[in-house]
Amino acid sequence: MSLINVSNLTFSYEGSYDDIFTDVSFQIDTAWKLGFCGRNGRGKTTFLKLLMGEFEYRGSISSSVKFDYFPFPVVDKTLDTMSILTTIAPETPAWQIQKEISLLDITEDALYRPFQTLSNGEQTKSLLAGLFLRGENFLLIDEPTNHLDMSGRETVADYLNRKSGFIVVSHDRSFLDTCVDHILSINKANIEVIKGNFSTWIENKERQDNFELAENEKLKKDVKRLQLAAKQSEDWSSKAESAKMGKGAAKARKKGNDGIDMMAYNAEKSRRMQQRRKNLERRQQSAIEDKSKLLKNLETADDLKIFPLTYHTSRLITVEGLEVTYDNNNHSDCKKIINDLSFSLMQGDRIALRGSNGSGKSSLLKLICGEDIPHTGLITIGSKLVISYVPQDTSFLAGDLKSHTEKYQIDETLFKSILRKLDFSRIQFGKDMRDFSAGQKKKVLLATSLCQQAHAYIWDEPLNYIDVLSRIQIEDLILKYQPTLLFVEHDRTFCEKIATITINL
């Protein structure tokens, strides 16, 4: 057993006034299977790079193990896969490499093909196998699921469940439940480590949030009651002090005695009232301090809204006998990716397109949205049908958010309000979108779509890189407003909650 100790870690990027981490301390065991969670932009990838020694920081990170980072950089993708894996794990015999990739459902022939000809999913799985064959290093696996279809995610989750000694960043709840035994969570106010999978963590978080909300309400009432009691005590104390110093003593002298007994009584009464007032103020201050310790990690996941339009007929889109063939400009190597596909998108449907990588899901969505892709068959789009499209790619996003709203003719205030609800900080609004994290870029595209009134929403892998809490917000939104939706998504939990119809390609 070996430990990774993080002590008083503080880090910010050069030129930034905002710390990513401030005085953070925690400890993890290198034998754990650790899931790494947190809102987009909280610093998950940054922390992995700190472990790799890529940035300078204050505080200390100590460990007796070395680290390997996924995705592993492949310099020459024209080499065959076996050569690349042999470079990653040079002391591993060929038979062992063949055995390892078979655990990830990769056929042996893939080892002898150029790496660049493998699908994104095959490349992901091959590199994971190579890194685990490498030896005793602790693996830092950064969002491997984004290039995997649903079947691939299940395969990799089962594979990781057989392993140990890694941190995996993922927002896929089903994936994390399968393959991790601890969760490392970057919260709003701290970083915590708990034993269990994602479901354990989210249940604990909800329980803690509910407890703190109840305590907060109780303390708010206590503070108000104590403030009122302290004010009453102050009034009584003032009256007792007045009696001690003035009218009480004068009245006693007028009656012919020296007033000593009455003055002593009033003095004691005043002292008690002053003490009571001080005690109440101390209790009030203590309640305020207790209240200030609560809700620091409460994630505000405000409800989102969408404004779908109602179409004048029940049928919006019809696909009949669709065939799409991909030839990569090499007619001797044609591949039919969609074969004789027929279906209709009716008003209120939420259709999930499922299939392995390369099965034509994105091509179908692009065709419906008007992109010129060679095909046969018929796609009928309803007259004057308004479609809102979220593409899979985010690389085209650049410039400031104001210019983005002008380009897409959406309301800037509404757009930024949605981003705030998706945990964008105001400081992000002044940045160039090229500097956003992958998850933040995807949120820009989703917020754009939510600002658009449309008859049909067509989303291509909308949850790629999106954090779990934002996924839950989007699920709640769809279930509440029930827009007509045609989408591709590999998050099993999301699909099971959202889809009314599933089409397998």
Image (spheres, helix red, strand yellow):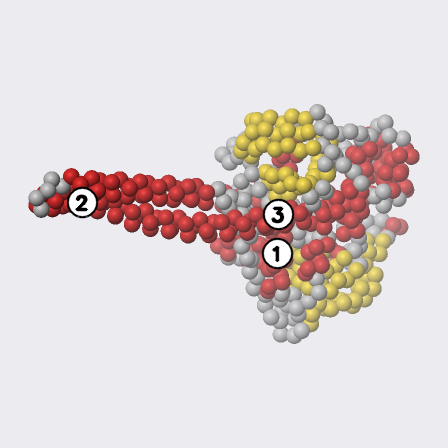
Earlier residue among tags 1 and 2: 2
Q: Which structural element holds mark 2?
A: helix
Question: Please, is residue 358 above or below residue 387 in the view?
Answer: above
Q: What's the residue at 41%, 50% (across, down)?
A: 222
The residue under label 3 is which amino acid type? Answer: Asn
Q: CA distance from mark 1 to mark 2?
A: 66 Å
- Closer to us: 435 or 203: 203
Q: What's the residue at 79%, 60% (across, down)?
A: 504
Earlier residue among tags 2 and 3: 3
**Residue placed under numbered mark 2 in the picture:** 243
Question: Please, is residue 110 above or below residue 376 in the view?
Answer: above
Q: What's the residue at 79%, 67% (across, down)?
A: 342
Question: Please, is residue 423 above or below residue 111 in the view?
Answer: below
- For the residue carrying disc 1, how many other residues have a C-alpha within 10 Å: few (<14), some (14-19), or many (20+)? many
Instruction: Give the percent coordinates (x, y) of residue 237.
Output: 25, 44
Image quadrant where residue 140 sits: top right
Q: What's the residue at 63%, 27% (across, down)?
A: 61
Direction from residue 239 to residue 482 in the image, left or right: right
